[in-house]
Image: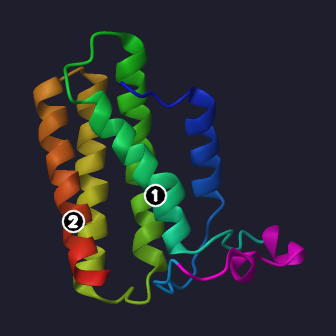
Amino acid sequence: MKKLSFSMIGLSVILASGIALAWFDGSRKQAFAEDVPKPESASKFAPVGNLQHLMEYINEPIFQSLSSALQNQPRDEETWAEVKSAALILSETSGLVAKRGKTVTDEDWQSSSLLVHTEGTKLYLAAHKKDYDSAKKYLKSMRGGCSKCHESFR
């Protein structure tokens, strides 16, 4: 099982907390240099990357780690800690995702993000209780929120 180190998870949390509102351009081909903020705006919590970067570099790897950690019932504290950490990061970043899209007023966009947040929060709490069955159920529900959004907006 591939595990994220606590330093990588910590870095992900720091990166996620430093990202503010921005418009999603939907293009994977956009040059990264165009997305780099001017130095004077970085101290004002300007976005560091676009929504695609948030998903590709933070949410997708964290979700893969979470899915991997829950393939079998965690047997040790370290694995449960990774599950809690990943669920927390995904729940928290879902608010950033909700605020950053072109369609921030779109009900489907908002409801998908809220579903990830709500079910991720439940997963986080289930992990605290080491309730594997509930954690798996909430992971599946979170995946449904992600899929709903990806089907509608990709």
Which residue does the image show at 35% across and 43% down from the upper left? 64
Residue stretch in magenta: 29-43
| Place of residue 111 in the rendered image (x, y in percent of width and height, measured from the top left) | 23, 73
Q: Find residue 147 and report its image quarter.
A: bottom left
Q: Which residue position holds label 2?
A: 147
**On the picture, is 26 further left or further right than 140?**
right
Q: Residue 78: where, in percent of width, then height?
A: 43, 16
Three-letter amino acid code of the residue under disc 2: Ser
Q: Is residue 58 above or below residue 28?
A: above
Mark carried by residue 93: 1
| Residue type for callout 1 | Thr
Which SS class for mark 1? helix
Query: Magenta span has 146?
Result: no
* Residue ID at (25%, 54%): 118
Q: Residue at x 57, y 56 (%)?
A: 16
Of residue 80 and residue 43, the one placed in the foreground of this image is: 80
* 133 over 9 or under it: above or below: above
Side of 45 where 102 appears, left or right: left
